[in-house]
Image (cartoon, grey):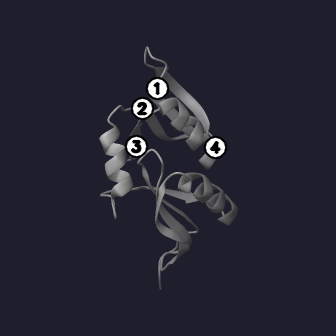
Amino acid sequence: MKLGATLYVKNSVEAVEFYIEAFRMTLGYNVKNSDGSFLHAELHKGEESIFAVSENNDEEIVRSMLAAKQPTMSYAVNLDDDDELNYAYKILAAGGHVLRELGSLPWSPSSADIVDKYGVCWYIYVSQHRPD
């Protein structure tokens, strides 16, 4: 089984470029609405589709996520190394809200929790392992 994820955001065209830069991805299969925004845009890492982005015009959703102390869910992204993690952290944190600064957890030597400027909550980490 594979879990699919779609991020419903305002300004989907801008958001797609933002996520492509943050996670060093490419745009895969996509369909645009008549206004040029994305009805569906798949973002790939290598050959694998990681998540999709779709347009959402409900600004209240973004405001509520940015104000949340702990959103009800987040997207976890296991990055390859600290350089990738630091790069993504810097981009995602710009204009967003850092819930937990970069640091270690018992199962990950380096991770952070961020709500980005589009209201999407991310748990980014490297080298996840299980505690003894």
Q: CA distance from mark 2 to mark 4?
A: 17 Å
Tag 1–tag 4 contact (CB < 8 Å):
no
Number of marks? 4
Q: Mark 1 or 3, which is nearer the eye?
A: 1
Of the residues under marks 4 and 3, which one precedes in the sequence? 3
Give SS at disc 3: loop
Can residue 31 be seen? yes
Q: Is residue 25 left or right of residue 39?
A: right
Three-letter amino acid code at disc 2? Ser
Three-letter amino acid code at disc 4? Glu
Q: Could you tell me residue 42's position as x and y percent?
A: 50, 33
- The residue pinned by badge 2 equals 54
Q: Mark 4 or 3, which is nearer the eye?
A: 4
- The residue pinned by badge 1 equals 38
Disc ID at residue 5: 3
- The residue pinned by badge 4 equals 21
Q: CA distance from mark 1 to mark 3?
A: 15 Å
